Image: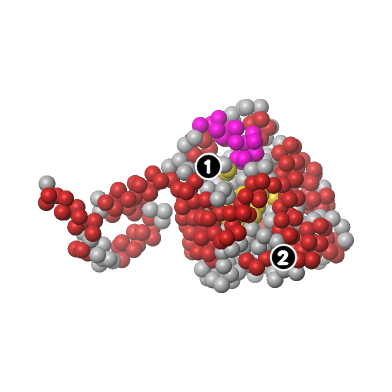
Amino acid sequence: MTQLDAARKKIITDKMRAVAKREGVNAEFICDGVSRGVIIIPANSGRDIKNLCAIGKGLKTKVNANIGSSLGCEDIKDEAEKLDAALKAGADTVMDLSTGEDLKSIRGLILERSTVPVGTVPIYEIVSDIIRSGMEISDITKDDIMACLKKQAEEGVDFFTVHCGVTREALRQLQEEKRLLDIVSRGGAFLAQWMMRTGQENPLYEYYDDVLEIAKAHDVTLSLGDGMRPGCIKDATDRAQITELITLGGLARRARDFGVQVMIEGPGHVPIDQIKVNIELEKSLCDGAPFYVLGPIVTDIAPGYDHITSAIGGAIAASAGADFLCYVTPSEHLRLPTIEDVREGVIASKIAAHAADIAKGVRGAKEADNAISLARKKRDWEKQIELSIDPDKARMFRDSSKVKPGDDVCTMCDKYCSIKIYDEALKSKR
């Protein structure tokens, strides 16, 4: 029985209780949300996850970190350290996006070591295997696809990104649209190439019921991928993107009817003034399914700073109703991220998520800010550092300044600290 099946029977599972405790809500709230498809708990039935999370309406905005190797950059030790960095920084989930030759070993390590849910994009492994065997992408068969999905589900993967909405109709819309950047989704590009060379429909769409069978057998959550997402702000909210989103809404309904949990992936590169409408469209077309957004990145001019451009978009998107932010690192568009890039990407995305949670009135969000503000008022530096989103960096800044041991001010204002001056004024008045 999947979590969705249980919820529809009003059975509160141990996993529902665990995420309810973490969120500070009652288990009935979680059960009801799962039953309606507005909350998901990505957790493979064959894997024991220490830090479960729930994603969706009324809950804290969650953050995902992408790690994994690429061709020419395959160091399993580096990926292990990136995983550790992501977890330490507070990622709620991780995705293994490996495309190198050693991707199976890396996925095995991540599944073994990760204390949070793990996602994958199975088409990456499928393409890597076919190319390595000397064949072409067009040689991939339906059986190749389903065998990979089944194997990864059996290994314990908690959620799959499957680009089921890259259909022949979506490609037709794309070709008529004349985008500035056509397809920037790697999974979407793989499937588009297969379809254009074979003249056939996307197997993930055509044989969607087979995908659902595999997912249900292991309670794998489907993350319906945005293969037509815009790769620059000029292409945002165009017909190709919306055609795919309409398709994903129908597929999400079919998944829920089948007893499979589902979320929807979204753009991408979106100017600020279009973010809210993108969220509203997804919620309307997909019956409130949790929305998982990459960024969104709000301007294309800042390579090296896209953890910032995406955090701006992420805060706006989540405050408008997005449920799950995929981090973007400073090195997006430039290179495979380093360990430090991963850490900075997670922190930036968590700041965006928390800022949105304040706006959404999520339980505990404002209280966290009030607590650190009280520590500032008291000039309790240790408490401020402890309550900060990145204590290591806060401590480094404090320790690197020229403050004397026991000083209750910082080097920005020193003895002219406004908080201290007013505090002393109050004391003298008494």
Structural crowding at the residue carrying mark 2, measured as other residues with C-alpha within 10 Å and reported as few (<14), some (14–19) or many (≥20): some
Q: Residue visible at 34% across and 54% down?
A: 385
Residue 59's disc number: 1
Is 343 displayed left or right of 395 in the figure?
right
Q: Quadrant of the N terminus?
A: top right
- Residue 108 vertical position relative to residue 27 in the rendered view, above or below: below
Q: Residue visible at 47% across and 48% down?
A: 359
Q: What residue sits right under mark 2 in the picture?
A: 183
Residue type for callout 2: Ile
Q: Secondary structure at mark 2?
A: loop
Residue 127 point in image, percent of width and height: 75, 61
Lower sequence index among marks 1 and 2: 1
Which image quadrant is residue 274 in?
bottom right
Q: Is residue 361 visible to the viewer in this orientation of the structure?
A: yes
Q: Residue furthest right?
A: 199
Is 291 displayed left or right of 151 in the figure?
left
Structural crowding at the residue carrying mark 1, measured as other residues with C-alpha within 10 Å and reported as few (<14), some (14–19) or many (≥20): many
Is 353 covered by the magenta stretch?
Answer: no
Residue type for callout 1: Leu
Q: What colour-coding does the image apply?
A: secondary structure
Q: Residue visible at 73% across and 60% down?
A: 239
The number of discs equals: 2
